[in-house]
Image: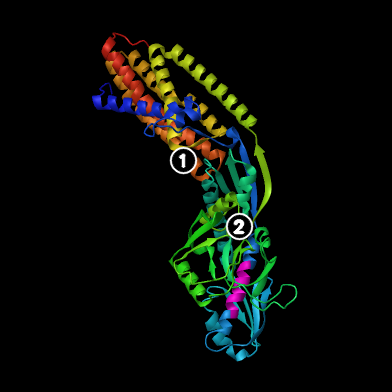
Amino acid sequence: MVQFPRWQMILVLLVLLTGLAFAAPNLFEEETTADLPSWLPGNQVNLGLDLQGGTYLLLEADLEAVMQDNRDDLVGGIRDALRGGGQRIGYRDLGVFGEEVGFTLIDPSLADEVRDRLEELTFGMLVTASGEGVFRIAMTPQQERDLRTDILTRAVEILGIRVNELGLTEPSIQRQGEDRIVVQLPGVDAERAKEIIGQTAKLTFHFVEEGIAPGIDRIPAGAEVLPASEAEQTQGPTSYVVRKRVMVSGENLVDAQPSFQDGQPVVSFRFDTVGAKRFGAATQENVGRLFAIVLDGKVISAPVIREPILGGNGQISGNFTVEEVQDLSLLLRAGALPVPLTFLEERSVGPGLGADSIRAGQIASILGLVFVIIFMAVSYGSFGLMANVALLANLALILGALSGLQATLTLPGIAGIVLTIGMAVDANVLIFERIREETRNGRGPVTAIDAGYRRAITTIIDSNLTTLIAALLLFIFGSGPIKGFAVTLSIGLMTSMFTAIMLTRLLVVTWLRRRRPQALPI
């Protein structure tokens, strides 16, 4: 263990220089690091919500509304299936009955044919039919549980896309319970974040039923009345009668970007292959007809189809501001939320709390560092000083790793660093005590150091590996602050093993070769 090849020396120096390079930007103001050349490390450690301040939001997903929408969609699908297929099948009382969808056949003898027509719509569902032709259709409990889980998972993913497009650093978005989501946004304006997060952004295209006045004329089956947006009301009616059947949905959008047309802000969108085909066919067969662009249940525009739109590209225009166009483009790119969200709780964390936390963490870290340095110097003399050099290098490597990985430092993360300071010298204590024991047994300086490192290294690896496993489990199964603690603890364990086994040994071996002492000062 006293043999230290040149390549190992070079490796240790390269790791130290890299760590110092990544840690250095944290010593300067953010404006200063922004002016550095692009090939130099310039990332600083991200501060979490408890240190930087920001917004905490607790949202509740209205899963029952989604289940109701699914039942309504099933009603529309059943209506089309019974009316199509070459022979129209008579029915009555088609609608939603609690958690079931039901209808009654006029001719009960057609029950088998009805089952065949509904097979694709009701795959895996519970379908019951009585002898009088009364059908009831409902999801199985497992289907309902899977759907609820999938809806909430997709909502978390889409919220993540939205807040990341806002340019936020390390937002935290997590499920809580069966129908709630916690969103933590460090250093962000709460009002704009709520506007972006809270909108469902469900975009659909429908044909308009022309010549029907809402509130006066009878609304035909398969149609509904939708209000116009405030911007649309300034240049058109306050509401529209539109077909419930969706011509094309926003799920087929692949891109949406803000742009200008005739000096007015508009949203330019592009469909995927399937959406472009549907949109092209619908516009080709309905030239001269009005179609409504519906966002979150409001008609934001109702232009006339003047010619077939076959390329899959289009524009959404209206009395939009530049910021509204930018936000709408962002929402459409991210995708529609699969469920309406309600804000249950909002907390704004001020920077004063962050400053107090940072100050307390700094004091704890400095005191821990000073006490450890004094203890090592008093207990092990020159060897203790070498361990202290390695300890300072260890802190630089931790800071460099956090900066390079762009990890978020929270208050529990600072606790992990403070804990690492105490644990960082643990390996050196084991080695030095083993060297001291070998010296008492009459070994010379070289053999004592060699035996000390060789016999202590297995214990060091075992103890650190078990702690690292615990830290990894905390990271995998923990959430929020627990993850921050696990990250800094894991990084600290790996860097402390490197500095103890490699850096301290390099310093000891270099000292041994130069001084060639007759006795060890330990």
Q: Amino acid at mark 2?
A: Thr
Query: Label 2 near label 1: C-beta < 8 Å?
Result: no
Identify the magenta region.
69-79
Indicate the position of residue 145 as horizontal and vertical percent values: 58, 62
**Image quadrant where residue 410 sits:** top right
Judging by the rendered image, the residue that carries numbered circle 2 is 200
Left or right: residue 209 versus residue 477 is right
Q: Nearer the viewer, residue 412 or 516?
A: 412
Q: Is residue 74 magenta?
A: yes
Residue 240: percent from left, percent from top = 66, 69
Is disc 2 placed on a helix, strand or loop?
A: loop
Q: Which residue is mark 1?
A: 472
Look at the numbered disc 1 and give the secondary structure of its residue.
Answer: helix
- On the rendered image, what quadrant is the C terminus found in? top left
- Is residue 263 depicted above or below 308 in this figure? above
What amino acid type is highlighted by mark number 1? Leu
Tell me the quarter of the image containing the N terminus: top left
